[in-house]
Image (tube, rainbow, N blue to C red):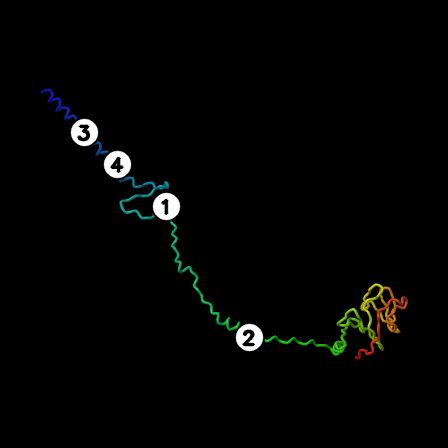
Amino acid sequence: MTDMHQLKSDSESLNSSDIQGAEASVETLEGSLANLSLDKTTSSSNGCTKESSDSVIAPSERPCNGTISVHPQESTESTKEPKVEKDTGSIENTSSAPAPAPTPEKEEELSPKDQALKKLGLKATHRPGFYLYEDNPQRLRIQTSTHAFDLDRRCPHAKADMLKWGVLRQNNTLVCGVHYWRFNLEDEGKCIAHPEETLNACPVDRCIDW
């Protein structure tokens, strides 16, 4: 009989402790649910927090501190440059047209004096009565009031240019203004002081008639 009472007492104490443990578990679970309903913020993987709700969360998350920049994708068709077909008809017509005939060069206008000199193969210089040969600029033509002579342009002594330094004197004598050598044009242009030196002068039958 004593054993029966002891067993009943143990059973009652066991049931009482189990009930108390279950009630404690229920209270703990209810507290957790209450905390979940009150704390509606969760932490994201980047350390920011976001609000949670029972509704479906949008695919894109809002950044915590910042603004949302929306960059709409531009249409590739609108950014492409329109193809412009060039009309080459006018170019082809231009290229196929015959080239204009070159205009003839205007003939050089010469004075009557220059025309007369050109017929003799001469050209005028800056000195009256002194002329150069077009085909041989190393020879001079000197014309006095009565005679004309062809002679070397360079003095045989120091190679002075007689077109620049030659001074015509009386009796058809030409003086070099560098060292004052005198040459007799009527005697083959020989130097009067040094007959072995000469300007190789020769008279010209035809004088220039102005």
The mark that comes first in sequence, 3 or 2, is 3
Judging by the rendered image, the residue that carries numbered circle 3 is: 18
**Closer to us: mark 1 or mark 3?**
3
Judging by the rendered image, the residue that carries numbered circle 4 is: 32
- Which residue sits furthest front? 196
The mark that comes first in sequence, 3 or 4, is 3
**Closer to us: mark 3 or mark 2?**
2
**Closer to us: mark 4 or mark 2?**
2
Which is more toward the observer, 210 or 71?
Answer: 210
Judging by the rendered image, the residue that carries numbered circle 1 is: 63
Question: Which quadrant is home to the C terminus?
Answer: bottom right
Helix, strand or loop at disc 3?
Answer: helix
Judging by the rendered image, the residue that carries numbered circle 2 is: 98
Helix, strand or loop at disc 2?
Answer: loop
**Residues tagged 3 and 4 counted as in contact (Cβ below 8 A):** no
The residue shown at (84%, 76%) is 147
Task: Answer few, some or many: residues within 10 Å of disc 2's Cα (few below 14, many 20 plus, some between 14 and 19).
Answer: few
Task: Answer few, some or many: residues within 10 Å of disc 1's Cα (few below 14, many 20 plus, some between 14 and 19).
Answer: few
**Residues tagged 4 and 2 counted as in contact (Cβ below 8 A):** no
**Closer to us: mark 3 or mark 4?**
3
Q: Amino acid at mark 3?
A: Asp
Which is more toward the observer, 56 or 210?
Answer: 210
Q: Amino acid at mark 1?
A: Pro
Horizontal relation, residue 161 to residue 64: left or right: right
Count of all numbered marks drawn on residues in the image: 4
Task: Answer few, some or many: residues within 10 Å of disc 4's Cα (few below 14, many 20 plus, some between 14 and 19).
Answer: few
The mark that comes first in sequence, 1 or 2, is 1
Q: Using the image, determine if residue 131 lies above or below residue 61.
A: below
